Amino acid sequence: MHPSVTPLARILRLNTELLLNCVRDLDDVIANRRVTPSSNSLAFVVAHLVDSRHFLAAMLGSPLANPIAAALAGGRTLDDPGRLPPIETLVSAWESISAHLAVAVERLDTPALASRLERPLPGGDPTLLGGFAFLVQHDSYHLGQLGLLRRQLGLPAMSYATAPREPGRQGA
């Protein structure tokens, strides 16, 4: 792994586990409940993060078919996506893209990381490395939302504890 992406890869792995902690023991009713009419549901934020990680994979030159893309297509407001896939499906998609990213990150090299993005992301660094860093921060931002939504729904706080993963299910 390129040394400049090692800390980002570690945060991706941590964020993978933290999202799983945020959705552990949720059912679809709670996952789709909104605290207020103008707030996101836990399920919507998870779907957005799955979609965002697919964007990151494509940006890193390793696209993967997004199994929830159709559910998010054309969404401009909180109500546009309509019915999201079950939380179990969203979690499975999260684990799949996370494992895929873990491999894609390993393949990054200096020329790729220094390449300029066609459409730079916020943060001021127009390179692939800068875009990668922004999207890792984006993950973290939305994980904070998930933690807050849990508490607002009367659920226990998100845990930073990480559990041993099942063999063959290593996330990013």
Image: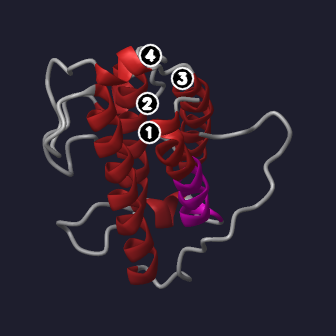
User: Which residues are drawn in magenta?
Assistant: 13-24
x 79%, y 49%: residue? 165
Give, as a three-letter code, the residue at label 3: Ala
Compare residues 49 and 42 and report the one nearer the observer: 49
Q: Which label's residue is closer to the chain start, 1 or 4?
A: 1
Q: Which label's residue is closer to the chain start, 2 or 3?
A: 2
Check contact, mark 1 vs mark 2: CB within 8 A: yes
Q: Circle 1: is it few (<14), some (14-19), or many (20+) Cα within 10 Å?
A: many
Give, as a three-letter code, the residue at label 2: Ile
Q: Circle 2: is it few (<14), some (14-19), or many (20+) Cα within 10 Å?
A: some
Give, as a three-letter code, the residue at label 4: Pro
**Residue 68 numbered mark, or none:** 2
**Residue 50 numbered mark, or none:** 1
Q: Is residue 133 left or right of residue 160?
A: left
**Residue 104 numbered mark, or none:** 3
The residue singled out by tag 4 in the image is 63
Give the quadrant of residue 156.
bottom right
Single out the mark in the foreground, 1 or 2: 1
Q: Quadrant of the N terminus?
A: top right
Give, as a three-letter code, the residue at label 1: Val
